[in-house]
Image (cartoon, rainbow, N blue to C red):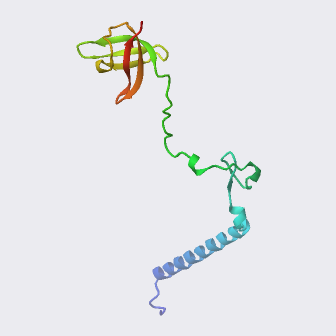
Amino acid sequence: MGKSQESYNKKEKEKKRRKKKKDKQERQEQRKAEKAERGTKTFEEMLSYVDENGNLSSTPPDPSKKVKIKAEDIIIGVPPRDDSPMETIRKGQVKFFNDEKGYGFIIDDETKESIFVHVNNVEEEIREKDRVSFEVEMGPKGPSAVNVKIQE
């Protein structure tokens, strides 16, 4: 560029470009210096371990506290329902029974819960406040009483 073609504006733009390049180089050198100060860690120093309580630790776990777990014992999700038979025959009192509609409810003596009963599961005719013995089965909407008999 000749002297006549250089303008003040062009000189200023060139100054800004050089300053920007110089600043960028200084920042780069500063980052390199900071990295050198911190020092590089070895692979072993970067590792983290999980102790027996599930906490992260910088030291490896003690092999004497290692517990073997079988893969079959691990339950993922909801554990299976315990289908162990409870006491099969229960006793209670008829709280409500509607002969016309053919259903009612029995209050279990032990658990004090209300259990649905349908006329098809009743062996003898029952009325309110009768003492009965029955078995419980899980129906589509919850527990229901079957094999309902009047107690003597």
Q: Is residue 134 left or right of residue 33?
A: left
Residue 82, given in percent of the width and then of the height, sits at 50, 34
Q: Quadrant of residue 49?
A: bottom right
Q: How many marks?
A: 0
Q: Is residue 139 visible?
A: yes
Residue 39 occupies quadrant: bottom right
Residue 72, x across and y down, in percent: 56, 49
Q: Nearer the viewer, residue 108 or 43?
A: 108
Give the residue displayed 47% in from the left and 82% down from the top: 10
Residue at 32% from the left image edge and 12% from the top image edge: 124
Which x, y percent locates residue 34? 69, 67
Instruction: Using residue 60 as the reference point, say whether residue 90 is left or right of it.
Output: left
Considering depth in this image, is 64 or 104 the residue closer to the camera?
A: 104
> Relative to 67, does residue 105 appear above or below in the rendering?
above
Residue extending furthest toward the bottom: 2
- Residue drawn 33% across and 17% down? 122
Quarter of image, res 105:
top left
Image position of 152 with respect to 89: above or below: above
Looking at the image, residue 122 sits to the left or right of residue 3; the answer is left
On screen, residue 72 versus residue 1, left or right, reads right
Between 117 and 28, the residue placed more toward the observer is 117
